[in-house]
Image (cartoon, rainbow, N blue to C red):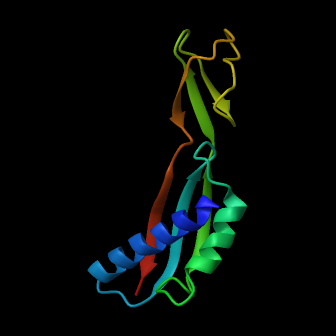
């Protein structure tokens, strides 16, 4: 489960930012997860529960924000929502597309004391 290593990286990043802000407590963390990122949301939530034990994030509220996938066809430039990387363009049926949105995986915000 690579979500555990993702969760551990999130904890490390949050810890670093909190230290830089001289914070001792993280009250809330918001995490953006793109639908096309390859991260399974339920697995990430479980992994975060494990990875935050005995850390500055242990009692933090974790909010997860799903970013829907959006692609642009490279042949006809039509933009369309997609939930996977292999969806043909609904307009011209081409499989040549670029992902515009949905591969994100980032910490959106931290609320600290």
Q: Quadrant of the C terminus?
A: bottom left
Image vertical order of residue 104 relative to residue 112, above or below: above
Please state if 29 lies on the left or on the right of 83 as rendered: left
Looking at the picture, tell me which residue is in the foreground, 63 or 85.
85
Image vertical order of residue 67 relative to residue 100, above or below: below
Residue 85 found in image quarter: top right
Residue 75 point in image, percent of width and height: 54, 9
Please state if 87 lies on the left or on the right of 33 as rendered: right
Q: Name the residue: 44% across, 88% down.
A: 25
Q: Name the residue: 69% across, 63% down.
A: 43
Image vertical order of residue 93 relative to residue 14, above or below: above
Image vertical order of residue 24 relative to residue 35, above or below: below
* Figure label count: 0
Residue 110 found in image quarter: bottom left
Residue 31 point in image, percent of width and height: 54, 63
Q: Name the residue: 51% across, 48% down.
A: 104
Residue 24 point in image, percent of width and height: 39, 91
Looking at the picture, tell me which residue is in the foreground, 54 or 72.
54
Q: Quadrant of the N terminus?
A: bottom right
Q: Residue furthest front?
A: 1
Residue 23 point in image, percent of width and height: 35, 87
Q: Name the residue: 69% across, 25% down.
A: 87
């Amino acid at each position: 489960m690579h979500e555990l290593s993702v969760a551990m990286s999130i904890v490390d990043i949050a810890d670093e930012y909190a230290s830089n802000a001289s914070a001792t407590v993280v009250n809330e963390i918001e995490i953006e997860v793109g639908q096309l990122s390859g991260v399974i949301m339920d697995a990430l939530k479980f992994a975060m529960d494990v990875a935050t034990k005995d850390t500055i994030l242990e009692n933090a509220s974790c909010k997860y924000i799903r970013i829907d996938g959006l692609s642009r066809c490279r042949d006809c430039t039509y933009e369309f929502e997609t939930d996977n990387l292999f969806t043909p363009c609904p307009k011209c049926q081409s499989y040549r597309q670029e992902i515009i949105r949905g591969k994100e995986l980032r910490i959106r915000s931290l609320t600290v004391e």
